[in-house]
Amino acid sequence: MHWPFTNKYNEKGDIEIQKIIESIEWSHKNYEKQSWSKYMKPSKQNYLILEVIPSSTVEEGLLIDQLSESREHLLKFVGENGIDLKI
């Protein structure tokens, strides 16, 4: 399932956004150690996409609330304009 980033689901703690960001940063800093580095250069931009796949029975109002809460949660980590990693 693709759950929203709401307080209800965040308490389960399956996804830690800060760890994802740190992993992307580590991958770029250690680019030359990656097995694929001889075939391609590291990306210049990375996009984190919010993918919520709601139940077919979720009401529209609840879905909009969940999307809004998810957006607010993710903005705590990346802000309105994204983040620049120091690589």
Image (cartoon, rainbow, N blue to C red):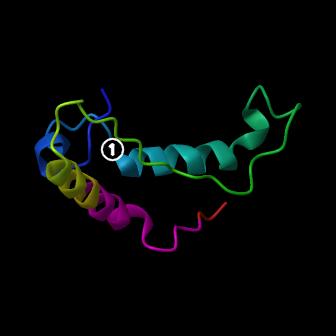
Classed neighbour count for the residue bearing mark 1: other residues with Cα under 10 Å, few (<14), some (14–19), many (≥20):
few
Read off the magenta span: 70-84
Q: Residue placed at 44% from the left, 64% from the top? A: 78
In this rendering, position of residue 62 left or right of residue 80: left
Q: Residue placed at 62% from the left, 65% from the top? A: 86
Residue 25, above or below 14:
below
Q: Secondary structure at mark 1?
A: loop
Q: Amino acid at mark 1?
A: Glu
Which secondary structure is most common in the magenta stretch? helix
Residue 10, above or below 87:
above
Relative image position of residue 31 (x, y in whole percent): 74, 42
In this rendering, position of residue 39 left or right of residue 50: right
Which quadrant of the figure has residue 39?
Answer: top right
Q: Residue placed at 52% from the left, 68% from the top? A: 82
Relative image position of residue 12 (x, y in whole percent): 16, 35
- Between 3 and 84, the one lying in front of the other is 3
Query: Does 23 lie within the magenta span?
Result: no
Can you say which quadrant of the picture contains the C terminus? Answer: bottom right
Which quadrant of the figure has residue 65?
Answer: bottom left
Which residue is outermost to the right? 38
Relative image position of residue 33 (x, y in whole percent): 74, 34
Can you say which quadrant of the picture contains the N terminus? Answer: top left
- Between 15 and 49, the one lying in front of the other is 49
Relative image position of residue 10 (x, y in whole percent): 19, 44
* Residue matched to label 1: 16
Residue 23, above or below 75:
above
